[in-house]
Image (cartoon, grey):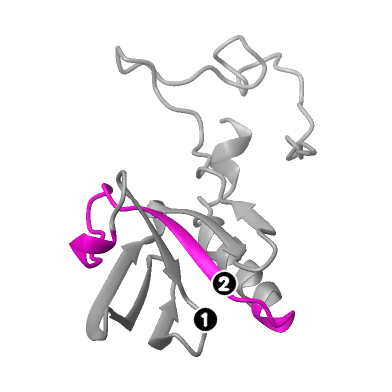
Amino acid sequence: MSNEENFPAMTSHRPYLLRALYEWIADNGMTPHLLVDAEQPGVRVPAHTVKDGKVVLNVAERAVVRLQLDNDSVRFSARFGGVSHPVDVPMAAVVAIYARETGQGMVLPEDVGGPQPDPDGNPPPSPDGDGNGDGPGAEPTSPKRGHLRVVK
């Protein structure tokens, strides 16, 4: 049994990053904006706000009503051209969050899934590479550790 099977699947990290960055931007007195891929399924924004398949949304507390940043989506109501519209953005469609005044923020990383079967449906190789990590004579392996990469 591979190490990935020893642990339950984790939820997406994207909504947690989004909420943390939103709070950081707001706590610093800046205006949080979201860059959204408006061509993703489930995105509901006024059509006239979309340019080249993208839309920038001001999500500052003073600009929206009933902001919800849950694990699945970003929802709120806002005025566009003086008319109130409901907005619904699936979490997968949020490309980035940044402060309007400084541009500081983050492009949200893609979710990283576990090992996937190959196109023929064969299971992914085990961590020790022989396809049988728990058979007789198998050497114990140390738990896999996460890795971080510094991005400048």
Task: Name the quarter where the N terminus is drawn.
Answer: top right
Q: Looking at the image, which is closer to me, 8 or 86?
A: 86
Residue in view at x 33 percent, y 64 percent: 89
Residue 36 location (% of width, % of height): 40, 55
Q: Is residue 42 magenta?
A: yes
Residue 60's disc is: 1
Residue 29 location (% of width, % of height): 70, 83
Q: Would you place residue 30 above or below residue 150 in this image?
A: below
Residue span colored magenta: 26-49
- What residue is shown with label 2? 32
Evaluate if marks 2 and 1 touch, with contact meaning CB atoms under 8 Å apart.
yes
Q: Would you place residue 131 above or below residue 44 in this image?
A: above
Q: Amino acid at mark 1?
A: Ala
Badge 2: residue crowd in 10 Å (few <14, some 14–19, many ≥20): many
Q: Looking at the image, which is closer to me, 87 or 3?
A: 87
Q: CA distance from mark 2 to mark 1?
A: 6 Å
Classify residue 73 as left or right of residue 148: left
Q: Quick one: label 2 or label 1, which is nearer the N terminus?
A: 2
Q: Looking at the image, which is closer to me, 145 or 96?
A: 96
